[in-house]
Image (cartoon, rainbow, N blue to C red):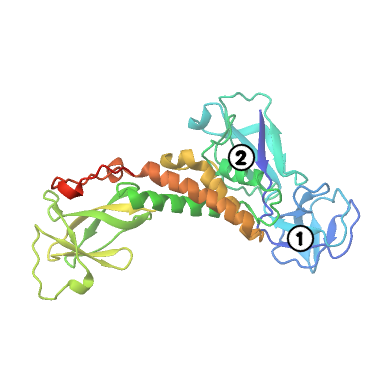
Amino acid sequence: MLIRVNNNLTVNSPKTFFSVSKASGVGTINVKNINSFTANLAAQIGQTGEERSEIKVISSVSGTNIVLTANTTYEHPSDTPVYSIQYDQIVFEKSSSGTAGTATPIASGTVSITPDSIYTQFDDSTGATSDAYRTYFRNSVSALTSSESDWLTSTGFSFFSLARIRDRVKGKLYNSGFIKDDDQLNDWINEWLEEMNNAIVDVDKSYSLGTTNVSFGTSGMGTISATDFKQPKRMFITYDGVNRYKATKQDISETHPNETYNQSHPYYIWWGDDTLQIAPSDTAGTAEIVYYKRPSLLTNDADELPFAMRSHTKSFVNYALSEAYYADDKDAKGQAYLGRAIGDKNLFIKEMTPRNFTGIEMIETTHSVYGEEESNTFF
């Protein structure tokens, strides 16, 4: 079973450059700037995927010199990039119970990162298709480790996952050098996720709803703590935990200091993004709120699109491609792919619109047509 991990530690990492050329087998390298380079961190010499790229752990820094814990393997010319990264190893873990189990390090599964390739590969010769894997980065000197990755299985990431959508975008780009990192693609994919989510809500007010309870005191003030809150759809008020009354929205400009309210017909008033006031406010209680949610962003590789959008993955690919071509000043291609994305979004809106919102409208005939209004002429 082959497991591969992308070598992406240099993305957004501080870097400097060789100030002079160095032969192979040296323990000290001379660089132009040592900011962000400290003892026990790892240093990658050369860009990821280049033939002579290598990673060494830093022993100490002084002036513009970086002393390594092991001699270099290759010679490097002046202006070779050097990246400050934390780790020089990858630990491969396995669960024999699939993703329901607990991943533990494989006996021979701690390997050095191979920066001369875009990924580091490990062959689990005893692996089975039912096994699941996780990985994390490790520093061989300080033993510092990163957090675990998402689960990896023999089937790979699902077709609806962030990783697969991102890879499909990359596969359609002839030159993606202008894309800084995967985070840029993730942002574009999540932008379109928000666009598609808002498109559903526009035609189906029952989509993407959440619930939360907000306690309020005798001042009537309460704060919504739900992190995905967007705006309220419906609100019930209870003062005793038994009787519930539907609340009516009232604008702050319509309130009057001497206005009288009744608990059986409460009102709610918004103060800012997440603060509300209940009237009457002489008794503490709870506001039971049904609200429109913001979509959960795709952040991990294994995160998947909402069910309603899974038959429209191509729109996410096309939107990301449009942004990529715009970023590369290829506006004609950007416009073409954006048009495809919008076309698929319109089809998506049509599919998601409740059937009772569409169809032929019938007009009732209130009188018959007689006399000169009749005609045997056909058009």
Badge 1: how crowded within 10 Å, few (<14), some, or many (20+)? some
Q: Is residue 25 left or right of residue 199?
A: right
Distance of label 1 from label 2 (alpha carbons): 28 Å
- Between 66 and 204, the one nearer to me in the picture: 204
Relative to 94, is 74 above or below?
A: below
Res. 43 image quadrant: bottom right
Front residue of this view, candidates 129 and 332: 332
Residue for badge 1: 60
* Residue at the image position 65 percent from the left and 23 percent from the top: 126
Residue 194 spot, x, y in % from top left: 45, 53
Which residue in the protein does label 2 denote? 135
Q: Secondary structure at mark 1?
A: strand
Above or below, comparing residue 63 to residue 327 in the picture: below
- Going 13% across and 47% down the picture, which residue do you hit? 367
Quarter of the image where the N terminus is located: top right
- Residue 352 appears left or right of 357: right
**Position of residue 118 measured from the top left corner of the image (x, y, whole percent):** 72, 44
Q: Secondary structure beneath disc 2? A: strand
Q: Quadrant of residue 167?
A: top right
Q: Residue at x 34, y 55 (%)?
A: 226
- Would you say residue 352 is visible in this rendering? yes
Q: Nearer the viewer, mark 1 or mark 2?
A: 2
Label 2 crowd bin: few (<14), some (14–19), many (20+), radius 10 Å: many
- The amino acid on which the numbered mark 2 sits, given as a three-letter code, is Thr
State the residue in front, 367 or 325.
367
Q: Is residue 304 visible?
A: no
Percent x, y of residue 116: 78, 45
Residue 236: x %, y % from top left:
18, 53
